[in-house]
Amino acid sequence: MVNIKINGTALQVPENITILEAAKMHNINIPHLCYLKDLNEIGACRVCVAEIVGLDRLVASCNTKVLEGMEIRTNSPKVRQARKINIELLLSQHSARCPECARSGNCELQSIANNLGITEFPYHEDIKHLDWDQEFPLIRKDEKCIKCMRCVQVCEKVQQMNVWDVAKSGSQTLVDCRGGKDITEINCTVCGQCITHCPVGALVERDDTQKVRDAFADGDKIMIASVAPAVRTSWGEQLGLTHDEATATRLASALRAVGFDYVFDTDFSADLTIMEEASEFVEKLKNAKREKFPMFTSCCPGWIRFIKMEFPDLVPQLSSAKSPQQMFGAIIKSWYAQILGVTPDKIYHVSFMPCTAKKYECDVECMNSSGARDVDAVLTVREMDRLIRSEGVNVKDLQDSEFDKPLGTASGAGHIFGTTGGVMEAALRTAYNLVTGKNPDPDAFNYVRDYNGLKEVEFEIAGAKLKIAVVHGLGNIRKLCEEIQSGRVHYDFVECMACPTGCAGGGGQPIHEGEELGEGRGKILLDMDKKMTLRFSHENPSIIQCYKEYLGKPLGEKSHHLLHTDQSKWELWKSK
Amino acid sequence: MSRLVIRPETEIQATANSLHADLERRVTGAPPGLCPLDLASSYLKVYSAQTCGKCVPCRVGLRQLEKLIDDLIEGRGDLKTVDLIERTAESIYHSADCAIGYEAANMVLKGVRGFREDYIAHATKGHCLAEGFQAVPCVSLCPAHVDVPGYIALINAGRQADAVRLIRKDNPFPSVCAMVCEHPCENKCRRGLVDDALNIRALKLYAVTNSGHVPVYREGESAAPATGKKIAIVGGGPSGISAAYYLGMMGHSVEIFEQRKQLGGMLRYGIPAYRLPREILDEEINTLLTAGDIKVHTETIIGGDSYPLAKLRSEFDAVYIAIGAHTDKSLRIPGEDAEGVMSAVTLLRKIGDDNYPDFTGKKVVVIGGGNVAMDCARSSMRLHADRVVIAYRRRREEMTALPEEVMAAEAEGCELFELVAPQKVEVENDKAKALWVQPQMISFVKDGRPSPKPASTEPVRIEADIIVVAIGQGIESYNFMNVPVNTRSGTIKTLDSEELENMPGIFSGGDCVTGPATVISAIGAGKIAAANIDEYLGFNHPINIPVDIPEPVPHNRPACGRVKLRERSVDDRVKDFSLVEESMTQEEMEQETNRCLRCDRYGFGTFRGGRELRW
């Protein structure tokens, strides 16, 4: 411990921490913009500056360590002036048209400028614009970028995709796609981690809410919503609800209030995915000699883009099962259209996702197998919140209501799809049943859960030893793929999720400055599963009904047509 | 009212002068920027401020040039803009009334022609060709990319042995370089913006002087497991030993083939002991040879019939040729073969093997203006010469020797004759008697430096018993190695990887590739060879940073002078070949290390390029 003083108060803090961390520990707020713990401590914005008594010049509190006897002032006139002017300088290059910005109200620059009482602006405006493909699911607005470098760091250090880089030099320095390439040509997985780590509105998803409003306005469409597992953990975060208030059933009411005719649960199709994927895996095991292992899960489109771009040789080892989103689209527009007695084009299906890559996935041409577009629009949780707010729905006063039947019934196994390890755990529960004819203890496989990046486990089903791996975050995935390709490791089944912690930490989730909420959200899903009596996908009555009435059997002809895909045929991007 | 008055400097003038001095320091002290257009535009702003405002091309034209270049920078221009810039600059150059205008235009013109591709890239793509970023100046300018801020921080923390370990990550020769490195690291030291560059080499000398013996491996450390691969290194100089050191650490078996009696190359046979004491050189080399399985064969010549390169290649998995540049260039003047005329290489080689000639009572003339010439002159003083003259064709300003070497030579009593070109050696009884030189006058600038031309005066006689020719070295024996050679410079031709084209597994680097250059570039070449040979053999053994680096402590950095090394008194030092320089004291070290601006942790270095953890 070292003895320091902050703003005159004597404090004891651990050695080797920064001034910013020390201040935070004692609830002293030092505003900061570019700082991102462990990832971006580069002292670029100079907003977190502090004064050390005895020193002439200010220091960045984000990367200056405390020392014994240090006397720090976080609010002296010198600090105040520098901080305010640095914000004003940033504003001179920032298109501060806040009312039309997706991040208004959740923007660090805006809130710091407000807090510092900036009401007049003394500098010349110098705002630059860069062209961008507005069709691409990920949109960069250079006129809003404050060059904090967070996107560069997240993409380089966590996801290791190196999409973003510093471009130009001197006072012309900006952030752009590496090598001056177009975003559609560079290996961007559309994971959206740069969006969730951007402090302002320079990186956003393509806004599809208007498309959905237009469908409502059409008046002729049957509007169907499906809600992905991880959405229920986070949808209320920016609508002023606590986690206890923001239940899935209240969400169902909110979406009905927006105007949806039917509100379904993507977790149903997560169960469906398990039926197909577990069966596929068991089949592969039976033909082990002819098959190549590991089999990879295929529900994460960020991961699919990654493997296609970075490890094309491994693509044939992907499960052919579509993702829950796309299975849902196919089933709604076939079986459910049949139940409703309408043609599929009468239905408008909106998929609510914690994900930006899903916007890409629904646009992949060969995905559509119902005869219409299986998924008409994908909205992230952030867009969903905006949609709910724009309809004036008062979520606090809503009563809970159940999802519609039959596509609103899901098992605990379906719920845990939204967190790392969940797909694997759900698949193993059903695979065990497929092989042995008996159910395992539903918690038998919960040791695949892990939030540290990579988890490897070995277990036995009916005497057969299986080696599996669960990995999340593209940097970790890259390392694993290299190991697999080099033959240094061997697995039978691998679950990959592009975002750290899986969909719970997805690129389409609400943004909270300086906080990583993925793990906490994931645990909500694990908790839901734990409390359920229905914990096996193959016991979901709606799943049983669906196979009985429509699909036949897993891997059957209809399933093959509707629920499986040839990943090698997915184009990475086609500009319209 | 007086007819003429003295005008004392006003406060305003004093401020202006001081700012002017700051600007000068800033321009010399910092990299000028990454984008050549940005650079041109900002300089044009200075030129516009300098114009007197009378003539049109200068007053209006320079401002227009600035705006046109800004158009390109801001992405508003096209190829026509580039063309217009060139024509305008040309016209200003041709028509401005005085040098303020036409020289400004000339600089723009040089830029738009020299950086043509960058201008075109701006016009067509809206950005520069130049990639990269503002690197840590000292690290990027060091050919071996030694972690300078890192070891300065360690020296400051009193961790001298760790400083040595950190240096060895990129440069196995900290002791040698502490004494003889040309320290390109200091050229653009950012501290120059405040006062003056850090004395980096002197700090390194402090570290090696105070570290005690630092073995290659600490307890529990060792070379990587043996790979079973064998690598031959031809030439036991700094480049060859550096490659051997890293390859040994990586677990390969290395054999060094050295033509002479002892290892060291130019370190032993080119640099006299008063700059690099033999015991220090020997200790450093002996330490490095413990890095792994490294065998040494001295007095073994590779190439020719006895041991052709092809044979060596067939016996080893890879070969590194680092034979240096040891042949002397001759003057081609009458009388050159007389007794008493010798090459610098011959003299220094003798000294290298402790075979000191006696120049007692002799008059010595050393011909040349490089560091080797200074080494010969200063050695001659120590060999008890009666008089030592350094004869150089150009002026002191054009000498390639480090200014401190020239100063030291003069301090030790050598006389410098500038602007004299050797014409003939006067010979009596087959012995040199005098050197006749043709006086020169300095004339036009060619290839960036003023060139001499013969003056219309009579030749001058300089009495001389010994004439040492130090006008550069060439590369020997490559031709009977049958390796590709650059026809113009006579050096060995390699790819960027230092591998020889169409000769897989044979690499080459150091002076034999670059021509006579610095110790640190030879070391850097050895490091590159080690990495690429390792990769060629199918491995990827990383060389990791061996220590943790202290965090910078924030403190005021008031402008402060640069600590210089003291030297032994002239009277004392000319009597022997012992080291001339004395290491700095602890308090000097503390002040000097605290001058370091820690560019690894401030500025762009905190974001990128601040520290290379492995290579």
Image (cartoon, rainbow, N blue to C red):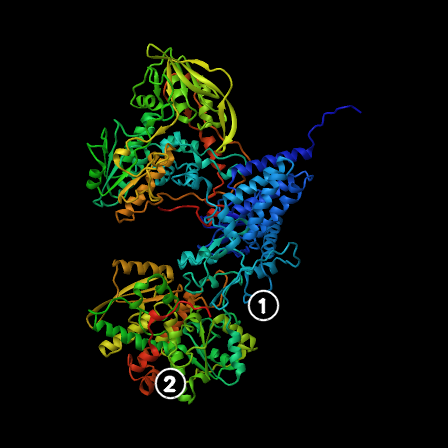
Q: Secondary structure at mark 1?
A: helix
Give the percent coordinates (x, y) of residue A241. 51, 72
Give the percent coordinates (x, y) of residue B360. 36, 12
Residue at mark 1: A100
Q: Is residue B164 above or below residue B543?
A: above
Q: Is residue A318 above or below residue A547?
A: above
Q: Residue B489: which disc?
A: none
In this view, which residue lies farthest toward the bottom? A341
Q: Is residue A557 left or right of residue B472?
A: left
Q: Secondary structure at mark 2?
A: helix
Residue A490 visible in the shown view = yes
Q: Is residue A356 above or below residue A338?
A: above
From mark 1 to mark 2, how far is it between C-alphas?
Answer: 41 Å
| Residue B12 lies in quadrant | top right
| Residue A506 lies in quadrant | bottom left
Front in this rendered view, residue B505 or A341: B505
Residue visible at 42% across and 28% down in the picture: B583
Front in this rendered view, residue A310 or B102: B102
- The amino acid marked with disc number 2 is Trp
Give the percent coordinates (x, y) of residue B269. 32, 26
Residue visible at 32% across and 12% down in the picture: B430
- The amino acid marked with disc number 1 is Glu
Q: Is residue A56 above or below residue B463?
A: below
Q: Residue A335: which disc?
A: 2
Q: Chain of mark 2?
A: A
Is label 1 on the same chain as label 2? yes
Residue B41 visible in the shown view = no
